[in-house]
Amino acid sequence: MMNIAQSRRRSHLRALKSFVGQFLAHGGAQVGLLVLVAFLLMAAAPSLLVGPLETVATATGNFLAPPSSHNLLGTDEIGRDVLNLVVHGARNSLAIALVATMISLVVGTAVGVSAGYFGGLVDVWLMRTTDFFFVMPSFVLALVITPVFLDVVGHQDFLGFRPSFFVIIVVIGLTSWAMVARLLRSQTLSLRERQFVDRARVAGTSNLGIMIRHLLPNLVPQIAANGALVVANAIYIETALSFLGLGDPLQPSWGTILLLAQRSGAASIGAWWYMGAPGICVLAVALSFVLLGNALDDTFNPRRRVIP
């Protein structure tokens, strides 16, 4: 028994090494990981890189000054360093996108696997609900939920964040799961006909046990590959919602920086650095997750690989 267990561990280790090697051999994965690691370091320790977040009281630069040796990305309309704002904004933008993606994956996986496994009326009702969320505009839902949420919980900070921060997370998470649910449903419809599911039923395993212990492990590749794409979409949604004024200027994200730049008339007076810096960050991070998602899909699905 010990030899069999050791053999299985060695087999799993070889498979993991093979997967990592194939994944890192993908050019898109290398670029995506490099960009993502750089932004994660920014989000993890912004104060170490650019000092504390500048405010109206601590701003020392000139108004809308162009990039210089003292302010590498110029300043905003009140003299704050744009580089300082962008680096600190990375934490909020990435935190919102990642936490919202986790919510989206949990909801999408639960709906998709349940619909595919049970079928019948359960499948019909869950898929009709999924179709509804395909066309649900996230920003309209946020506009409706935000005042209600604030009236219920008040304006007290929670874990150091203001309520609007969590409103955006919940809205993105609960409106971005439909694509994941659709994909996992189709995969579950195929997996539920396999022999290992029949053997589990004969052995007396409950439906929940079959879904968690037998179906879910086989769906991890699809969840991982599409999770990276969901993060990219969540970053775009967060930026759009914050640009519409649903973010918190006291805890700036890239979207709120773009909003402040638009309100200051940066585009009309030629202050390209003010709008360009957060915009490039949004595009770079979203593109890195798209590259990672494509690389994961190619690695998990050999039929998609391009043979030279």
Image: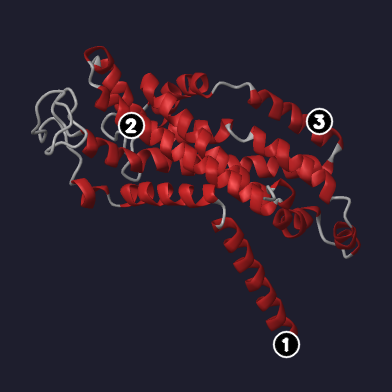
Does residue 154 appear anywhere in the picture? Answer: no
Mark closest to the chain's N terminus, 3 or 2: 3
* Residue position for label 2: 278
- The dot on residue 124 is 3
How far apart are the alpha carbons under marks 3 and 2?
Answer: 42 Å
Q: Residue 197 location, x and y as percent?
A: 85, 57
The amino acid at mark 3 is Val
The residues tagged by marks 1 and 2 sit, at their Cα atoms, a distance apart of: 55 Å
Which residue is most to the front? 308
Q: Is residue 95 left or right of residue 274?
A: right
Q: Position of residue 55 (x, y in %)?
A: 16, 33
The numbered mark at residue 198 is none
- What residue is pinned by disc 1? 3
Q: Amino acid at mark 1?
A: Asn
Label 3: which secondary element: helix
First in sequence, mark 3 or 1: give its number: 1
Q: Is label 2 in a helix, a strand or a loop? A: helix
Q: Picture quarter containing residue 258?
A: top left
Report the residue that reaches farthest toward the bottom: 2
